[in-house]
Image (spheres, helix red, strand yellow):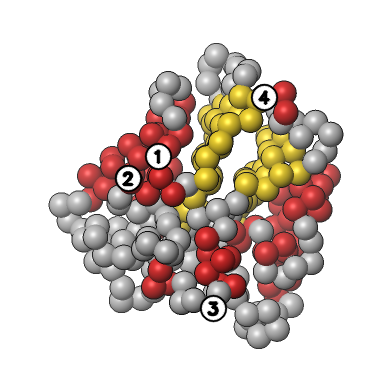
Amino acid sequence: MRIESSTEPGTPDRPNEDFLSLALPASGHGGVLVLLDGVTPRPGNGDCIHSVPWFVARLGGALLELSVSRPEMTLSDCLATAIARTADAHRDTCDLYHQLTPQATVVTVRWNQDAVEHLVLSDSVLLLEAPDGKITPVLDDRIDRLVAEGRAVPALRNAEGGFFTAAADPAVVSRAVTGSTPRGDVRAFAALSDGATRLVEVFRTDDWAGTFALLRDEGPQTLIRRVRAAEAADPEGRAVPRGKPFDDATAALVEL
C-alpha cells in the first residue's frame, strides 16, 4: 500500500482549516481516511467562541474514531454521531443554530478486503481509480449548480434548495453522497479539499484524470505547488474570480 499526503494553508499568516487523518487498523485488512475542509466564517458573523480549526479537529477526530472502531455503523451514521458529539462539546457556550456556526465539508473513505465505502458532503472531492485506470469523480455538486444558476451561495448554506455542510445538525448526513464499490474495482483513490481542486474547478487547466496522474507520478506536494503557481499568477483574482485568491489545500493519494 502506498499513502502520500500534503497540506498547506492558503496564506502563512492564517491557520490551516483543513483536517486530514488516516488510520490503518491492527487487523491489517483495511483503513479509514477522513478529510475535512473548514468553512471560514465572514468577520462578525456567527456566535461561537471556538475557532474553525478547533471544530474540524473535534469533528474529524470523532469521525475517524467511530469509522475505525464501529465497522457495523455506516459512514453516514458515523458522521451523524460525530456531529452530535462535537455539537454537545460546545452547545452550552455557543449559538449552534446560527447559519455560520463552525462547519466543514467532508470526505471519508473506509475500505476492507471486500469493499470501499465513501461519503462526500459539499465541495471537497473524491477520485476513484479503477484497475483499468479509469477515474471516477465522486462529487456533491450542489454549489456548482447554484453558481451556474447565478444564485447567492452564502445565503443558501444549510438551507433547503441550497447546499449542506457538517455543522451542528446530524440530519445533514441525509444530504451526503454515499456509496460502496467492490474492493477489486478500486485500485487507488484520492481525496482533495477544494483548494487542491482548483486546477480543474477554478483555473480549468486540467481534468480529473490529469490531476490523478500528477498525484501518482509526482505526488500531492507537486499538485499543491502547481495550484499555488496558478493563484500567484492572478493574486487578486481578477482574471479568474474566486472566493479566496489563495485557499488552504490538502491532497491525499492511497494506492490499495
Residue identifier under label 3: 150
Q: Earlier in the sequence, mark 2 or mark 4?
A: 2
| Numbered label attached to residue 210 | none
Amino acid type, label 4? Arg
Q: Quick check: marks 2 and 4 in contact, CB under 8 Å?
A: no
Q: In the rendered view, tell whether residue 146 sits above or below residue 150.
A: above
In three-dimensional space, the C-alpha distance between marks 3 and 4, rounded to whole angstroms, equals 40 Å
Occupied quadrant, residue 114: top right
In three-dimensional space, the C-alpha distance between marks 1 and 4, rounded to whole angstroms, equals 22 Å
Along the viewing direction, whichever of 16 and 156 lies nearer the viewer:
156
Instruction: Residue at 43%, 42% (x, y): give it.
Output: 60
Occupied quadrant, residue 44: bottom left
Circle 4 sits in a helix, a strand or a loop, which is it? helix
Circle 3 sits in a helix, a strand or a loop, which is it? loop
Instruction: Residue at 63%, 80% (x, y): give it.
Output: 241
Residue identifier under label 1: 79
Q: Earlier in the sequence, mark 3 or mark 1?
A: 1
Circle 1 sits in a helix, a strand or a loop, which is it? helix
Residue identifier under label 2: 170
Q: Position of residue 233 (x, y in %)?
A: 74, 77
